[in-house]
Image: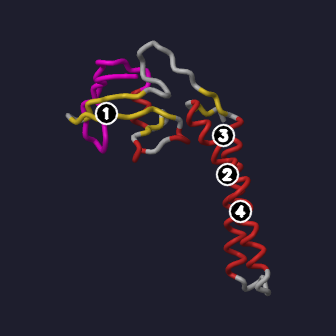
Amino acid sequence: MTQYFTGEGLKKLKEELQELKTNEMRRVVKLIAEAASFGDLKENSAYHEARNMKSFLLGRIEQLESAINDAIVVEKKEDGAVQVGSELVILFDGKEEKYTIVAPGEADILKNKMSYQSPFGQQLMGKKEGEEFNYEIKGKKIKVKILGIK
């Protein structure tokens, strides 16, 4: 499934994949070997936990490889509209807030990175500076105004 990323976001995914395939996989394989050396594998909780860690790690590697293979790096257009990679200043219910619109895999609300696929991100996409709209959360309408786009 096609996923859109900023150049920076795709680079971070590739770095994470490299880290997981090298250092993290070595660490987990070593844990499995150490736990196996304790003997009876049937009742060896350390062994089973290490195997679960490996399964989780392989799943994450598969996710990252899939995302990277299906990635499309979005180049920002200079048309003034909100798009992936846009840095926004908005007035949200009377409070000024800053966000960057990113791919779902890059989203981190604690760092004000919002997915373009989130409900609010979808509302913002394509809007231009100065536009206003109402955004509904739990039945309450909140006024949103786009103050600036970079």
Mark sitting earlier along the chain (4/3): 4
Between 140 and 82, the residue placed more toward the observer is 82
Q: Mark 4 to mark 3: distance in Å?
A: 18 Å
Q: Nearer the viewer, mark 1 or mark 3?
A: 3
Circle 3 crowding by C-alpha within 10 Å: few under 14, some 14–19, many from 20: many
Mark sitting earlier along the chain (4/2): 2
- Asked whether the residues under the numbered discs 4 and 2 touch, taking CB atoms below 8 Å apart as contact, a structural biologist would say no
Mark sitting earlier along the chain (1/2): 2
Residue designated by label 3: 67
Q: Which mark is residue 98?
A: none
Provide residue 29's location: percent of width, then percent of height.
76, 66
Q: Is residue 126 above or below residue 109?
A: above
Residue drawn at 68 percent across, 54 percent down: 20
Residue designated by label 4: 55
Quarter the N terminus occupies: top right
Q: Is residue 10 above or below residue 76?
A: below
Circle 1 crowding by C-alpha within 10 Å: few under 14, some 14–19, many from 20: some
**Residues in magenta, as a range:** 125-150
Disc 2 is placed on an element classified as helix
Q: Mark 1 to mark 3: distance in Å?
A: 30 Å
Between 42 and 29, the residue placed more toward the observer is 29
Disc 4 is placed on an element classified as helix
Residue designated by label 1: 135
Q: Which mark is residue 19?
A: 2
Image quarter for residue 136? Answer: top left
Q: Mark 4 to mark 1: distance in Å?
A: 41 Å
Quarter the C terminus occupies: top left
Mark sitting earlier along the chain (4/1): 4
Q: Mark 3 is on which residue type?
A: Ala
